[in-house]
Each structure stands twice: as structure tokens, then as C-alpha cells.
Image (cartoon, grey):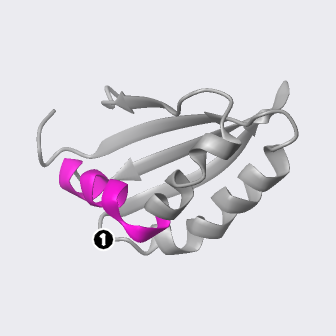
């Protein structure tokens, strides 16, 4: 990946049974702060229409460095500290390169 290329990312988070509400709340809590992070172009939360326990964050970052910084920034680290109690399976990340 070109270090200066815009990075598009899809993050999929599946909540444990009974934890969807808490996962959603924790995701929504960090959105305002993440959107203020340097290099954040988009950070938008979605829910799977066929499975309300699956949340999808669609992100865009100015470059790989901005995404890396996000991964170590306080808002994401705070969320990440709850993954063991909230997620039914490991976080799934899809890094995308725009073609057209």
C-alpha cells in the first residue's frame, strides 16, 4: 500500500449474545473523538440489516500513518479494552484500495 494513498477500511464487529446494545453504545461513544483525529476522512457506523448483533464501521483515512495512529489513540484503545467481554469473534478488518 502506498504510504500516501487514502486508506479505506471496513471493520466488522459481532457482539456476544445479549451484548449488542452495549457494543453499539461503546461504538457510538468514540465516534465524535475519532472523527477529530488527524487524517480521519470518514468513520461511519452501520448495523447489518439481517443480524442486529453485527456492526460495521466504514472508515477512510488520509494515509496508512493516520490509520496506524488511530489504532493506538485513546478512543480506539478504550473500545478495544472491552473486546473480550463484548465480541463473539475477533474483530474483522478489510483494508481496501479504491479502484474507480
Instruction: Judge by depth and name the residue closer to the eye, 75 or 39.
Output: 75
User: 34 left or right of 31?
Assistant: left
The residue drawn where x is 67% and y is 44% is 85
The residue labelled by disc 1 is: 38
Q: Return the residue found at the far left.
A: 3
Q: Can you give x and y, in whole percent of width and height, for residue 95 in the image?
A: 36, 31
The residue drawn where x is 65% and y is 68% is 29
Q: Can you give x and y, in whole percent of width and height, for residue 94 in the image?
A: 42, 28
Q: Can you give x and y, in whole percent of width and height, for residue 78 in the image?
A: 51, 63
**Position above or below: 95 against 77:** above
Say whether residue 16 is magenta: no
Q: Which residues are magenta?
A: 64-75
Q: Residues within 10 Å of mark 1 (few under 14, many from 20)?
A: some
Mainly helix, strand or loop, the magenta region? helix
Q: Quadrant of the C terminus?
A: top left
Q: Return the residue found at the far front.
A: 85
User: 33 left or right of 2?
Assistant: right
Q: Quadrant of residue 54?
A: top right
Q: Can you give x and y, in whole percent of width and height, for residue 26 in the image?
A: 68, 60
Q: Secondary structure at mark 1?
A: loop
**Position above or below: 67 against 93:** below
Instruction: Judge by depth and name the residue closer to the eye, 20 or 60.
Output: 20
Q: Is residue 49 visible?
A: no
Instruction: Judge by depth and name the residue closer to the eye, 24 or 38.
Output: 24
Q: Is residue 90 visible?
A: yes
**Position above or below: 30 against 58:** below
The residue drawn where x is 30% and y is 43% is 7
Q: Quadrant of the N terminus?
A: top left
The residue drawn where x is 68% and y is 29% is 88
Amino acid at each position: 500500500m502506498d504510504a500516501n494513498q487514502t486508506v479505506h477500511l471496513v471493520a466488522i464487529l459481532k457482539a456476544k449474545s445479549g451484548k449488542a446494545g452495549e457494543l453499539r453504545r461503546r461504538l457510538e461513544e468514540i465516534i465524535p473523538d475519532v472523527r477529530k483525529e488527524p487524517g480521519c476522512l470518514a468513520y461511519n457506523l452501520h448495523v447489518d440489516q439481517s443480524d442486529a448483533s453485527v456492526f460495521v464501521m466504514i472508515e477512510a483515512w488520509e494515509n496508512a500513518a493516520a490509520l496506524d495512529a488511530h489504532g493506538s489513540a485513546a478512543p480506539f484503545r478504550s473500545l478495544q479494552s472491552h473486546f473480550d467481554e463484548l465480541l463473539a469473534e475477533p474483530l474483522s478488518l478489510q483494508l481496501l484500495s479504491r479502484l474507480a
